Amino acid sequence: MAKKKTLKQQDFQKKKLKVGKPKQAASNATDTSFVAKTIHLPNQTKLTSTNDAEADLLRRLSLCKHHSEITRKETLIYLQVAVPRVIHGQVASRLMSACIPLMCDPNKHVREELLKLLDVVGSCDANTMRLYMRPLVLFMGSAMTHISAGVQRDSGRFLQCVLRHAGHELVRAAWVKMLRGLCNVLGWPLRGAASASAGAGSNVVSMHKNRALQHQNLQALADFIRLGCAEPAAAALAGCAAPALYAKYLLPDCPQPYSHLKLFVREFPADTAAAARPLHELDTLVCEDAATRRDVFLGHFRPVLAAQLPSLVKDGGDCGRVAANLLQLLDHVQQAAA
Amino acid sequence: MTSQVVPLSTFVQHLESCEGYEFRTMIKMLASPAYAKQQLLKDELSVFMAKVLKLLRSKDDYQVWKGCHIATVFCTYNPVVLCSFGGELMGILYRALEDATKYYGDSVQTEQRKVMVRALVKTLDTLMDLIRGKPSLTREALTPHLSAIIPMLISFGRCEPNLSLPVIKKLLSKHSTTFRPHVGKLKQLLTELYGHYQSLDPVTRKVVCDTAAYLHLTQKPGNNANEHQAHHKSFPDEHWRAGLFSVLSQFGPVVRLWGEILDIGSDENLARLLETLPRDTANDTSPLLPALTVDINKPVTLWHISARLEQLTDMVESFIRLPTLFPTRIPLGELVKVSEILLSLTTNYLPLKRGLRRDAALTGSIRSALPETQLQGIRLLRCLSDHIGKNLITYMPAILSSMELFIPLKDKKTSIDYQKCVDLQNGLLQLTALMNSIAQHLGHKVEEMSLAIKLVDICAYIIEHKQNLDSAFSSTSGTAKAAGGAKKKEYKAKTGSMSDLFSHPHKFLHPVPLENYTVVNTYYNMALTHWKLPSTQQAKITKYCIYYSLSFKEKLGYIPQTFIELLNTIVLFPGKDRFSILPIAVHLLKETGDPVFDVLCNPKLPLEMIQIRRQPTSSEDDTATSEAEEYAAPADQDDEHLSDDEHTTVDDGVATNAVMGLNNLVSSETLRSEQDSALETQHPEQARTSNLVPDEASEGREDARIFKKRSSSDEQDPPSKRTRAVAAQTPVPAAVPVDNGEPESDDGSDFEIPEIELSDADEE
């Protein structure tokens, strides 16, 4: 206390003016002594096309964070054209890390353009998408739990896009997370949710407002489950050049083959804060094999789906059709597990 | 001989005075076979032995100790001495020991005297071992003394059971008839020892139980059979079996004590098992156990139940473990039943009795005593699995399901209670060790994987515990808070600073002994090789192995052997993972190298693995109908008339065909063996063959002879199609034949000949 007081006193101390010495500058005085010919504002440079495509691209990437949604959209459209040229270069990593966060962009058109861009990236080089699985999952999860309803609704389309190009990686890396997120988007409360009724209510309202998009999310869920619960033997290994016998011992042909081991991830004890989240006991599972994924799905998610889908089927329309397909799929999965 | 070794007379002079290094050297020299001669017996040897006997008779402890060692060494290596002086030594040793032990407890005990007595007992034991089995020596030297030695050892057993009981145990098994009169005394001694069983050290406990088991060797089988059953052929192990059953029958009453506390009636199966436990048999020579005092008002006395069960398990183990002269019938069903009952006593599934007072002390002691009881079941099973092995297979389902009962569960849930696992660490490691022991009999056939998977999780938790910085931090702060909460001021005044707990929590970790890692690693090894684990567990094991291999490598400078084995297993059995961790494992073992990884990285596959049978397509092939696998076949020999363009086209054909067969199995470097030079010589010859049948042998006759010779000389590396293919892929420089003259290409001199021919072909 005593020390504080002295500090305070110092502030109010009056400096004595002395003869022959200049007046002391005020503490809030602005120094205006500099002289400059130009002022450089990096985010307002005039963009001119040059021969160096990569440098050109790099300059435009910063516009992904531009405040104007039109600029963001224009940038993404430009990138769609540029991607095939640079996808194997070093710029690709900058591009991905700049664009992926736009999944949670408030503007609908920006998200649409991003979807197109991701599709282009996936079709040009699926491995780039595999490499960026972690940020993709991170932002998809963020979109699925986003406060804005539009962002939430569009998350299913992003999921479908990633499924198309790097589906096996996605189901391995984020099986539980995505299922949980989709259930959240569709407004279905999960067992063990802390405030199930409250959380579901708001979602149901937002979902009913825009039913047209619900079937997209349902379709995404169906695709996701279909891919995750099927044995990868036929699909994945067909693309692999080496026979299955020794394929495991050859150099991996996909990026980050050991990411599921989490060798460089520091894990905190699970039972401190996570206990409140729904299905927190699934957090530590590694869903690398189809059997585990099936078990998790049948044990924790199937009952939820089985309870919600019949009412959607009754409503009919696009949603009803997809829901009926999904119900069939559930039976298939059950049979495969048995 | 006299010129080469120090004569015994020299030793005689120094015998009493020598000590230290001198004595050690002398003893070493006495082991020489040079002294085992009958001529020496008359003069030198008898004088020397008289001196040794004098040493043993001496009052000085040190002299007796020296005498003991000389007697042991001399008798062991010198049959002449053993035969001539064995009896006399036995007598003197017995007398010395009797003197020393008579007032053992009363007289002042110095460390020196204890060492001397130990030396005397050991020497007597060695001497008896040496004499036993030699007919006349036994008759003259051993048998007369035994009747005196046995009671002396028994009475000495009261003071030093760990010294005398091993000797008694041996005498019981080797001289059971001579021992019979002293059985009563021994039984009394054992009863006394059973009285303070818990205060004995583990080794002595084991020997006490062994001796008690061997007591059943002393009576003849069928001794107390009824008269009208006497004509039945009795088994030799009748008595032994009776002893085992008498111990087993004592489990019943003790276990039923738990029935007063746990509601056993709620599990019908367990209640029925408990009813069928063996009942007490009247005739028995086993020493008696003291009465058990258990008072529910003094909850700590509940621990006596576990202590008694531990003792009983020790006793049963001795019956199972010890070797006998006759084959024994072991009541497997009963033993498994006992262990099953012991393991079922858990609060996981059995509720406490309804009327029981619920205070913290009582429930706490019940919860702490029950796992100890279960642990005895695990120990029993472990012993059975180690000694009986595959005979347990029929009981496996029951054993495995009861083993799962040991795993602590959360109250009214099916998930594992990891907090309790920490307290039961030791027991769970024993469970894992039991699983390791059982699994080698079990093989791959396990329907129920839940125990295996749970054990993987538990092992991972146990081994991580107190190592993980985060958990240690939260736990220490938690305890500090709990301790500091109550009477903060007084507490602060009385105790030292607690700041270390918060500032240096990592200094308070318990080190995990290496044995724990060994048990866990063995289990993981076994689990990975036998079963296909779910990816969660597989990833857990992999991460654990990589993490600890690396940390051991950094801390100790080497990776312990069990971790290397585990790394090997993980690489070879990747389970459901997409890729094995071969690159990581190889990197970890970069310095030391590992044969398995070496092979995986540089595959040296058996050559001629791919064999292409020749298909007879045209009539011209009839001339050369040799099989493709027989490399060198006699064929037409005008190789010299080859044209260069022919040569190249055929080369391509050979290459593509063979490469297709190879399917990128091998890299070209690995296959560029020493034979390359020889194989390159084959190109011109192959030019004659058609593209479709590239491996048709049509070499010159001389070549054929040479290659036959070579393939017979070293069979490991016969020249093959594949090697040839690789050779064909790599362009052959013109200078190669000159290089081939190097001696490293072959040990034989035959190889120069084809090279000369090749150069001829090239010139054309």
Image (tube, coloured by chain):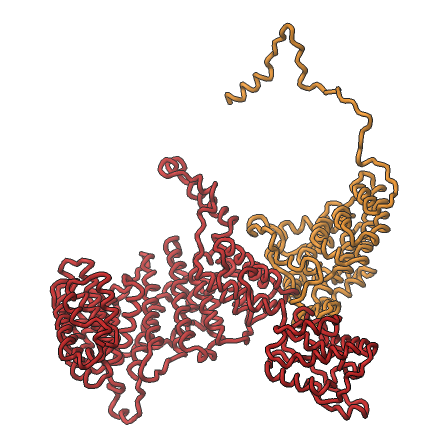
Chain colours: A orange, B red
Residue that protrudes farthest toward the top in the picture: A19
Indicate the quadrant containing the C terminus of chain B: top left, top right, bottom left or bottom right. bottom right
Image x and y of residue B172, in percent? 24, 78
Give the vertical position of A66 relative to A134 (above or below): above
Q: Give the camera-side residue of B533 and B692.
A: B692
Q: Quadrant of residue B667?
A: bottom right
Residue shown at the point (63%, 56%) measured from the top left: A191
Q: Give the camera-side residue of B677 and B470.
A: B677
Q: Give the camera-side residue of A271 and B751.
A: B751
B284 with respect to A268 (left or right): left
Give the vertical position of B19 relative to B189 (above or below): above
Q: Give the camera-side residue of A263 and B487.
A: A263
Image x and y of residue B594, in percent? 55, 66
Indicate the quadrant containing the N terminus of chain B: top left, top right, bottom left or bottom right. bottom left
Image x and y of residue B220, in percent? 25, 85
Q: Quadrant of residue B296?
A: bottom left
Residue shown at the point (47%, 45%) measured from the top left: B505
Counting labels gives 0
Query: Is residue B728 visible to the viewer in this orientation of the structure?
Result: yes
B635 with respect to B34 (left or right): right
Image x and y of residue B272, in percent? 42, 75
Q: Quadrant of residue B499?
A: top left
Residue shown at the point (22%, 74%) measured from the top left: B3
Query: Is residue B161 visible to the viewer in this orientation of the structure?
Result: no
